[in-house]
Amino acid sequence: MTSVPPAGESPPLPAAVPEWRDDHAGAAGQTIWPRPAPLIGDPTSASARAADPAGWALGDHVTAALQTVLAARRDIRRFRPDPVPPDLLRQVLTAGHQAPSVGHSQPWRFVVISEQATRDQAALLADRERLRQAARLTPDRRARLLDLQLDGIREAPVGIVVACDRRAPAAGVLGRASFTDADMWSCACAVQNMWLASRAAGLGLGWVTLFEPADLARLLDLPAGVQTLGWLCLGWPDERPPEPGLVRHAWSQRLPLDEVVLSERWPAGEPGPAAPVSHLAGPDQQSVVAGRDSGDDLLAVPGSLGVLDAAMNRALALRPDPPVSGTLIVAAAEHPVARHGISAYPATVTADVLAATQAGVSLGAATAQQCGLRVEAVHARPAGVAGDLVDCDAMSGADADALIRQGEELGQRLGADGLVCLGEVGIGNTTVAAALACLLAGLDPGAAVGLGAGADAAMLSRKRDVVARAVSRARAEHGRDLANPRVLVAALGGPEIALLTGVTVGAARRRVPVILDGLVTAVAALLAVRLEPAVQSALVAGQRSRESAHDAILAELGLEPLLQLRLRAGEGVGACLAAQLLLTGLRARQLTARVSAQPALGGPVRRQPPDPR
């Protein structure tokens, strides 16, 4: 029973409540309450964190151990046959599963392989791709690559394929709406975690990417939307390298840290860190001759198809199995230069044509479909503010580089399906291309600028003035740096031109023909050649358009066009028509009757026709 205090007296305070006390002389009493520390989550307080900012550290011994593991991580290629204990395998997989992921999406999927038959099939795929990749390099690098052991698929007791489940739309995953590949980056973090956990346990792990992703996906029955990051070889190492293998074999050296660290932003007007070295090579002499020889024994006059014969020889030099189909990529972009009255059409036309292309009903898309080509439409947009060329650069250097990289990835992917046709749409982009042509081919604005679709004399005059002012500003602001294609495309280019530059490089690396359309695509191709000279061997000029600078750019590329139809369409229409011509010619060359070599004595030997039975 609870007792009631006498009248006028307060009840006693509970023991858990602190007593009153004076903290400051003359001040009213102040109650000091204990901090309610949570039983879950972070128990620390702001005052405790402020008093000890480094209090979260795990200690010097842990830091030293981590640095040891980081420095000792190696890509292992040689393995012992001893099995990996199940608990150690689970430990490695757990490390991968503890990786950070964008939006906590955890997109990784680990396919563990131990069956010999699957390893054998994967090793065959890797061997094929190794030879394909070697064939794309310069002779010295080709020989050195073939000397290297690049995988341990057959040797390692365990294979792990890390796959990224990309079936959720990017916009529906926190953090992927803008950086759509962040899920792939998350899976790469998982690979790194597994690598470090393996090294700490004394296991070896090798990351093998010598695969066509689609081939590896088919081998493992991966569904559409699940993309592989390659094959991990896991086992006890039969080597204990003190440094990375490619360093030991003089393939490359680790760059000094100070060469890759920048302060605040990429230095304006300075080259910054050197671009990664490329060893891309064009077709070798034997491939070029073999491509030409494929048409020499036809029952036809040598060179009977003229420019088309030369284009077919070029396609067959890239790879002996000619493409049977391909893809039209249409890149669209907005151009602030249109505000200067240099186009007869409103800027909204760009979005309309892009939407029609995506729906498959634009002139370019319809032409591609009739030619048996797939269509891919891309809206090329810089992340930052786009300039009008006259008063400021078209885009930042970072945006130009990002678009080129995006294009390279696209070109690599599309090139897997056959030849690649380039198309574009963007009100004002012939003005952009003319400005670039002035600096790429040394043209005067008066010679570089064409009338354009629907323009009149007054508009032509404005267009020439805009190009002259843009070129003058770029020279004044960038000077000799304009010799760098990346600086040039940022200063005077358009987003779609940067993207198509990358597409051209990526498709050329696939060794597939890249069919050009009008001036805009030819300028993008010339920028690609300035970045990678070997790209030129993959180019085919689809047509000569009515733009004034097109002849000069084709001359810089050393290309003769297949068609001269006085087209103004853009959108890749001319490229598609030329691609259909090229594909038809390649098929005809395979089907055309052939003749025997003439013997040393006597007349020609005629082959007997096939028995109709």
Image: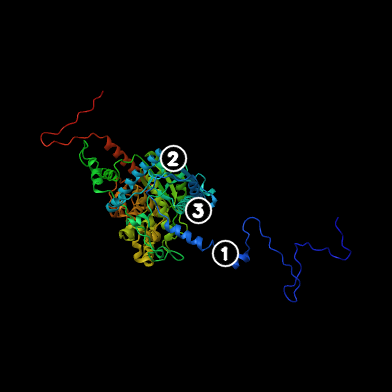
Circle 2: element type: loop
The vertical placement of 450 against 288, above or below, is: below
Tell me which numbered mark, 2 or 1, is placed earlier along the sequence.
Answer: 1
**What type is the residue that disc 3 sits on?**
Ser
Q: Quadrant of the N terminus?
A: bottom right
Tell me which numbered mark, 1 or 3, is placed earlier along the sequence.
Answer: 1
Question: Within 10 angstroms of label 2, few (less than 14), some, or many (20 or more) residues?
Answer: some
Between label 2 and label 3, give the one nearer the viewer.
2
**What type is the residue that disc 1 sits on?**
Gly
Q: Nearer the viewer, residue 592 or 553?
A: 592
| Extreme-bottom residue of the structure | 25
Asked whether disc 1 touches disc 3, contact meaning CB atoms under 8 Å apart, the reply is no
Between label 1 and label 3, give the one nearer the viewer.
1
Question: Within 10 angstroms of label 1, few (less than 14), some, or many (20 or more) residues?
Answer: few
Spatial separation of the CA atoms under disc 2 and disc 3? 30 Å
Residue at numbered disc 3: 178
Question: x and y percent of residue 70 in the render?
Answer: 45, 58
Q: Quadrant of the C terminus?
A: top left
